[in-house]
Image (cartoon, rainbow, N blue to C red):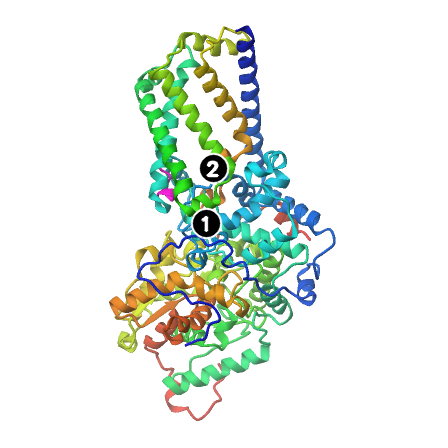
Amino acid sequence: MAFLTTFYAFLFYFAALVFVTGVLFKITQYARTPAPLKIPTTPAPTTTSGVVLRMTREVVLFESLFRGNKWTWIFGWMFHFGLLLVTLRHLRYFIEPVWFPIELVQPFGIYGGMAMIVGLTGLWARRFLVDRVRYISAPSDHLILALLVLIGVSGLLMKFVFHSDIVEIKAFFMGLYAYDFQPLPSDPLLLLHLFLVALLLIIFPYSKLLHAPGLFFSPTRNQADNPREVRHIAPWAQQLEQK
Amino acid sequence: MAKATFLVPELTQYTEVPAVTPGAMAHSSPFVAKPDFQEPLGYPGELVDDWQNKAIDKMGELLGKYRSLRVYMDACVKCGACTDKCHYFLGTSDPKNMPVGRQDLMRKVYRRYFTVAGKLFPKLVGAEDFTKEVLDDWYSYFHQCSQCRRCSVFCPYGIDTAEISMAAREIMDCIGVGQKYCNEIIAKVYKVGNNLGLPGPALIDTLEGLEEDVYDETGVRVRYPIDQVGAEVLLVTPSADFFAEPHVDGLIGYGKMFHESGVTWTLSTQASEAANFGMFIGSYDNMRRISQRIREAAIKLKVKRIVFGECGHAWRVAYSFLNTLAGPWDFLDPRYPVPQHICEFTYDLIQQGKLTFDKSENDDKVMTFHDSCNVARASRMGDTPGGQFEIPRAIIRATCNHFYDMDEDTIRDRTFCCGGGGGLLTDDLMELRVKGAKPRMDALNNVIQEKGVTHMAAICAICKTQFSKVLPYYGMDMSQIISLHQLVGDAIVLTPDPEDADDDDSDDDDD
């Protein structure tokens, strides 16, 4: 019991550290790498505000994917929007007092959990049923889906079948802020759920999950189409001119 | 009907997505460049010792120089949205021609040498050592990408396979494995000034011939000036325009249009090529060096504006990169964008009512329009996004009575590449070119059957050459592909100079 609490406490410290530093490192790396040429996929917005709008549509609506493949879009969007609601619902474990909007979102978080599972199942099915997608799937692609499905299913099971003491869970996480370890309930399902979440955080900066920060740095999406109006030149290319 | 040593695909009403056939195009590989054509570009003549380490070093260098490559190597989630978008996959069913399949050829090497996961668990994440087999696969399949960017339209992260195939070709060039077609052409540009290796005197001769032909046909002295210092406009056009059908009809059209505009113009023997194959091989240095010729010519000829003729990737380099590579253009007339597309120029004149057309001259044609990939997805015309689609169509409508678009899924930013772009317009890749043209041929065949379309206009030298060659494989006629400015040239009503009518036997006017 004491061992479990300590183990999970350090697991989450470690996971949070890896996640934050890893993602920050990648973001810094993306930001520091120059984009020497103007390569927006056209037609593209000609102004910065237009670019913000385009990016917002990509992030919120998955516009390009919608044009590309409707099934992947439906399942992908269900999963991601579900995950957003679930994440918002879970914020109640990490803040005190719970903000009003987070209170409002609580019931929707449950539906989000269900949508997440449906979306993930659809995406996973495509990896078996569509020969092209089967061809491009590596073991890691299946494992990440398995990880997310297990997180979702274990979460929903705790909600509907095997309840855990959520007051104690909250006390555990709030205690982590102050290095004050409160006992974590030892329900196997909860331990599994938390272990997998920690694992997800740890692999995030080392896997394709980097698509999340990556999108914001994609030059085909984040550049304004104004090469004739504004001269665009990377520092390393500027040096060629001084030769 | 052209003879094929391979199976030409059957046309279908809509292009169907084939079942994957691994290895279907593994045999397709262009000729390798000889040392003579590697060295002028600054590359080793043949595969260097220790090529593996040198290639990985180069990849590391490019990852640090190109954010696109850096982000695109990480971001792909293998969602599959791109898998049915590439014309080469649709035409060949080889899964390594799916955009993600092609990217993964590089991604598996990237993961092995540049990521923690790939170093620790290569099998799990699909990482692989950079072996000779992998290099051979690179050479084959990165020369089965025409860098048309259709995949990037549908990717949720905008991953552009063109960026990856350019980087791959640059890496291969740097270890001595270059492609003959591209590198030979670039060497020719450095030596002679254009892709076709046409020397200055030959160009001057050709243009004089054109002036005579146009005079014989129309009775109007239309000029095709070259190296004329002090002209207002420098026209930079693909060298195919100087002699080959259907390209030259476009050049004739430009001349007639300039004649009516009253704007003085000139070609240049030094910048006698709009194309910039430096882009195809992903070489910033070569692309820059080729672009600098245009700057030098503009300064030497003291022009005020630069206009580009009909060429797809040339317009990408011109519109998107020229300011970066050869700017700033502060010595040119600031009232006009630099550079301008010939279609923008013609369209402006039409808007101002300066051109008169007799559309009935084109009544023997029912037109459709092929959006060239690099114009459609990597550039713009006019002031508003999408002008690259509207302006050429407006010109066709102004010069023709009969125009029908092809299926919406195959035009504008969803257009299919002709199948010969990106440095693949070479006979040693004929099978790939024919098969890659299938999606476009399907859509064209549809409007031929349903709307009675007779001709397809294009604004790209590569598209025109490719279609001339490929149309016969599909039972169509090579003359069905024409230059957009041929329509302008055929329909335009020319204003004779006062002297034209009475001095047709003397040749001594001095302007």
Q: In terms of secondary structure, where does tag 2 sit?
A: helix
- The magenta region covers A61-66
Query: What residue lies at 31% left-to-right and 22% top-to-bottom?
Result: A108
Task: Give coordinates of residue B347: x percent, y percent.
Answer: 36, 64
Q: Is A115 in front, or is A45? A: A115
Q: In terms of secondary structure, where does tag 1 sit?
A: loop
Q: Which residue is mark 2?
A: A216
Q: Is B439 in front, or is B127? A: B127
Q: Farthest residue toward the right? A: B49
Query: What residue lies at 36% left-to-right and 73% top-to-bottom?
Result: B476
Above or below: residue A82 compared with residue B115: above
- The answer to whether one can see residue A8 in this image is yes
Residue type at numbered disc 2: Phe
Residue type at numbered disc 1: Asn
Compare marks 2 and 1 and give the one earlier in the sequence: 2
Image quadrant in which you'd find residue A96: top left
**Does mark 1 fall on the same chain as mark 2?**
yes
Does B52 appear in magenta?
Answer: no
Task: Give coordinates of residue B265: x percent, y percent.
Answer: 47, 71
Task: Give coordinates of residue B285: x percent, y percent.
Answer: 63, 56
Report the predominant secondary structure element of the magenta stretch: helix
Q: Chain of mark 1?
A: A
